[in-house]
Image: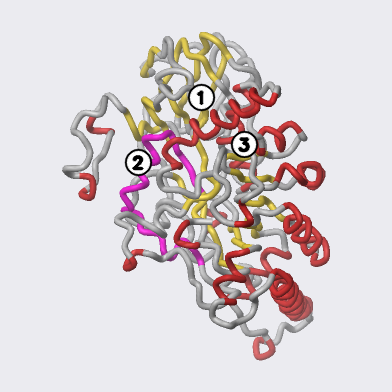
């Protein structure tokens, strides 16, 4: 939504101590920087230096099983080594007494515009919407990300360890999104989550038809939107087939090599299953149509975003394994958002779907735990019982799943990245605050240590020296 309106070219750790309840080896290979080297603008992310750290006596929500009381979590060499009731302390490990505190996976926001709409919010820095053509699949959000956006450390203080930054929603095809680790970096390549797949933002509904209809251009209606999607996919399929024919030819005559088209290259990457669709879509009927289009052209939708009416098609979403990214209580700010209900998230969850709380907000990203708590409260008022062990998945494991990084992060399991938050108390309480945030085992935020509570030039004079 966003108020601003909103290649393919052919190219640990052993467990220590006792076995841990709820702790199973992570699946899938570790992300390899080398795997990304073949692509343009490859990730150069390197984990920050870290010390072996043992967190003791905490209530731990693993996002992979039931809560653990008076439990421990051991991090070493950037990985989670063990989670459980009895974890031995290796020699020289830093021990954190978390008595009375809670521990969760790092928060993941799968819908952010940090960096592409950085602070201060001026027109000169507004780089999130290439609203010049209904199809701008050729643009990449990462080329607009300003790594020094002061909103990144503010999100870190809210426990956010990874995020997907998306372009805006003015177009039918808005461009590629990028998944970032929330660490300090001079370059966007230094932020890029190694191994994360590319994503493509699509938008249905009011935004594209309003933007182009107001210019007396196509599309100006919802039927125009759908015609635009289908025409683009037909071209992408032809482009893909052309490259396939050339690739299979015996001689691969360089003079007959097809010309690269950056726009169609992105769409062909979707058809190849290498780029994940992130689809801005509010209304249930439009989600169903987008599912039909995906079926017609043989691609998969990873997640619907701003899915205000997801509760109406929650069975379809669950059956097709499509995630729904939702707000806890945003509704009614435009016609297609009128039918929102506060039980949307828990109803999708109850149906067996992949429910996600997203922000689409530079402020909301700092309090995603509280947004999840709002949805839990709405569920209780309706008579539904949502446990904390389920709700934590809405802001950790499920968003990781929607952007293709759940093999490596999103839950506290041995072998996964040590992306961990220590909370002052129950993270679903309005009084619960992130006290310490670890990314790949490195302490990147410490509420008690000003040296790990960075302030940017833009905050000088605005934020009190001591945050209670």
Which mark is drawn over residue 154? 2
Could you tell me which residue is drawn at 40 percent across and 14 percent down? 91
Please name the colour scheme applied to the rendered image: secondary structure
* Magenta-colored stretch includes residue 146: yes
Q: Residue at x 66, y 69 (%)?
A: 267
* Disc nearer the start of the sequence (3/2): 2
Q: Which residues are magenta?
A: 140-163
Residue located at (65% from left, 56% from top): 281
Give the mark, 1 or 3, whose residue is nearer the N terminus.
3
Name the residue tied to disc 3.
342
SS of the residue under disc 2: helix
Give the image quarter of residue 92: top left
Q: Is 138 drawn above or below residue 401 in the view shown?
A: below
Q: Secondary structure at mark 1?
A: loop
Residue 441, image quadrant: top left
- Front position among marks 2 and 1: 1
Please count the marks in the image. Answer: 3
Q: Position of residue 238 (x, y in %)?
A: 76, 79
Q: Find residue 346 and report its horizontal and vertical position in percent.
A: 67, 32
Task: Judge whether residue 127 can be spotted in this image.
Answer: yes
**Residue at mark 2 to residue at mark 1: CA–CA distance:** 19 Å
- Residue 406 shown left or right of residue 457 in the figure: right
Say whether residue 431 is magenta.
no
Q: Position of residue 11 (x, y in %)?
A: 63, 69
Kindly indicate whether the residue at mark 1 contacts the one at mark 2 (C-beta within 8 angstroms): no
Image depth: mark 3 or mark 2 in front: 3
Q: Residues within 10 Å of mark 3 (few under 14, many from 20)?
A: many
Q: Report which residue position mark 1 lands on.
A: 428
Q: CA distance from mark 1 to mark 3?
A: 16 Å
Nearer to us: label 1 or label 3: 3
85 left or right, relative to 322: left
């Amino acid at each position: 939504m966003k108020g601003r309106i909103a290649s393919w070219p052919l190219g640990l750790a052993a467990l220590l101590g006792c076995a841990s309840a709820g702790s199973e080896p992570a699946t899938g290979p570790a992300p390899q920087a080398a795997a990304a080297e073949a692509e343009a603008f490859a990730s150069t992310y390197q984990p920050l230096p870290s010390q072996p750290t043992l967190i003791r006596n905490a209530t731990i929500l693993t996002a992979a099983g039931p809560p653990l009381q008076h439990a421990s979590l051991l991090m070493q060499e950037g990985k989670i080594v063990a989670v459980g009731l009895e974890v031995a302390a290796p020699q020289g490990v830093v021990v954190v007494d978390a008595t009375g505190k809670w521990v969760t996976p790092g928060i993941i926001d799968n819908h952010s515009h940090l960096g592409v709409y950085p602070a201060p919010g001026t027109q000169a820095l507004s780089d999130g919407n290439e609203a010049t053509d209904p199809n701008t699949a050729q643009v990449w959000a990462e080329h607009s990300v300003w790594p020094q956006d002061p909103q990144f450390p503010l999100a870190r203080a809210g426990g956010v360890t990874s995020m997907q930054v998306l372009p805006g929603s003015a177009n039918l095809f808005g461009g590629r999104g990028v998944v970032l680790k929330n660490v300090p970096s001079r370059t966007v390549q230094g932020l890029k989550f190694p191994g994360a797949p590319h994503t493509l933002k699509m938008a249905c509904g009011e935004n594209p038809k309003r933007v182009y209809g107001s210019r007396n251009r196509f599309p100006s209606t919802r039927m125009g939107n759908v015609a635009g999607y289908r025409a683009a996919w037909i071209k992408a399929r032809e482009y893909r087939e052309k490259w396939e024919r050339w690739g299979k030819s015996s001689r691969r005559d360089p003079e007959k090599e097809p010309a690269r088209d950056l726009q169609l290259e992105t769409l062909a990457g979707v058809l190849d299953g290498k780029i994940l669709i992130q689809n801005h879509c509010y209304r249930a009927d439009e989600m169903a149509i987008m599912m039909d289009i995906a079926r017609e052209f043989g691609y998969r939708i990873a997640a619907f975003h701003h899915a205000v009416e997801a509760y109406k098609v929650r069975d379809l979403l669950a059956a097709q394994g499509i995630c729904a990214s939702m707000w806890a209580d945003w509704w009614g700010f435009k016609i297609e958002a009128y039918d929102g209900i506060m039980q949307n998230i828990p109803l999708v969850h109850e149906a067996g779907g992949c429910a996600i709380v997203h922000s689409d907000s530079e402020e909301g990203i700092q309090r995603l735990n509280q947004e999840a708590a709002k949805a839990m409260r709405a569920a209780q008022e309706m008579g539904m019982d949502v446990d904390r062990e389920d709700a934590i998945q809405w802001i950790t494991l499920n968003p990781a799943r929607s952007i293709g990084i759940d093999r490596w992060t999103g839950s506290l399991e041995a072998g996964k990245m040590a992306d961990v938050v220590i909370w002052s108390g129950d993270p679903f309480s309005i009084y619960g605050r992130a006290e310490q945030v670890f990314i790949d085992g490195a302490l990147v935020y410490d509420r008690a240590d000003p040296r790990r509570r960075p302030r940017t030039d833009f905050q000088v004079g605005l934020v009190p020296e001591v945050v209670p």
